[in-house]
């Protein structure tokens, strides 16, 4: 169970930047990300998605694999993120609390739609597979390759 890729976007809708390491602050999120310090809804600090789900989407719809396509912050491998709702877990030196599933929105549907797949079909595909929203409960750093440990 590990972090395969890390992405931040300094401005809403702006280009994503791939990072090797990020810093997280308690209750604030990722330093330098567009959602840092925002508290509009629970779990806005950081988002995670499974690499396996992105690969499945690409395989089923004949697309080249692009691990940045969902615009989530962390792309993980080897962990079922849905099982982390309501749990605390550690990645790198940061501690996170799983808040809720990161269900697909209209923006994701539109971004991944094409002539063969409608925005509504994209959203249906990602329901229950779109990842996890989490809050930072222990400040720290996360780097590519960091392990994921569920707290007991």
Image (cartoon, rainbow, N blue to C red):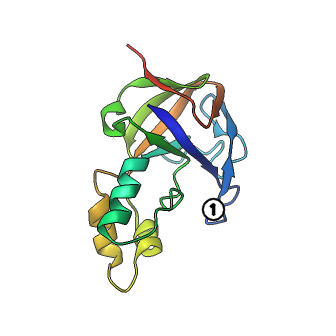
Which part of the image, by quadrant, shows the C terminus? top left
Evaluate whether residue 42 shows in this view: no
Please say if 83 is above or below 57: above
User: In terms of image quadrants, where is residue 133?
Assistant: top left
Please say if 107 is above or below 4: below
Evaluate whether residue 105 shows in this view: yes
Q: Is residue 35 left or right of residue 129?
A: right
Percent position (x, y) of residue 79?
A: 38, 35
User: In terms of image quadrants, where is residue 46?
Assistant: top right
Label 1: which secondary element: loop
Which part of the image, by quadrant, shows the N terminus? top left
Percent position (x, y) of residue 112?
A: 43, 72
Q: Using the image as rendered, state which of residue 25 and residue 144 is in the foreground.
A: 144
Rate crowding at label 1 as few (under 14), some (14 to 19) or many (20 or more) other CA atoms within 10 Å.
few
Q: Which residue is mark 1?
A: 12
Q: Residue furthest top?
A: 152
Q: Using the image as rendered, state which of residue 60 and residue 87 is in the foreground.
A: 60
Please say if 8 is above or below 78: below
Seen at 65% across and 40% down, the residue is: 30
């Amino acid at each position: 169970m590990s972090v395969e890729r890390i992405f931040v976007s300094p401005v809403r809708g702006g280009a994503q930047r791939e990072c090797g390491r990020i810093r997280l602050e308690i209750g604030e999120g990722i330093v330098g990300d567009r959602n840092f310090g925002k508290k509009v809804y629970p779990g806005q600090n950081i988002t995670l998605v499974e690499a396996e789900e992105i690969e499945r989407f690409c395989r089923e719809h004949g697309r080249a694999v692009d691990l940045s396509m969902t615009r989530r912050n962390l792309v993980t491998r080897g962990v079922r993120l849905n099982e982390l709702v309501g749990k605390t877990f550690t990645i790198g030196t940061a501690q996170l609390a799983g808040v809720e599933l990161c269900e697909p929105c209209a923006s994701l549907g539109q971004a991944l739609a094409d002539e063969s797949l409608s925005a509504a079909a994209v959203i249906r595909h990602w329901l229950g597979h779109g990842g996890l929203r989490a809050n930072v409960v222990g400040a720290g750093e996360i780097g590519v390759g960091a392990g994921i440990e569920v707290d007991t």
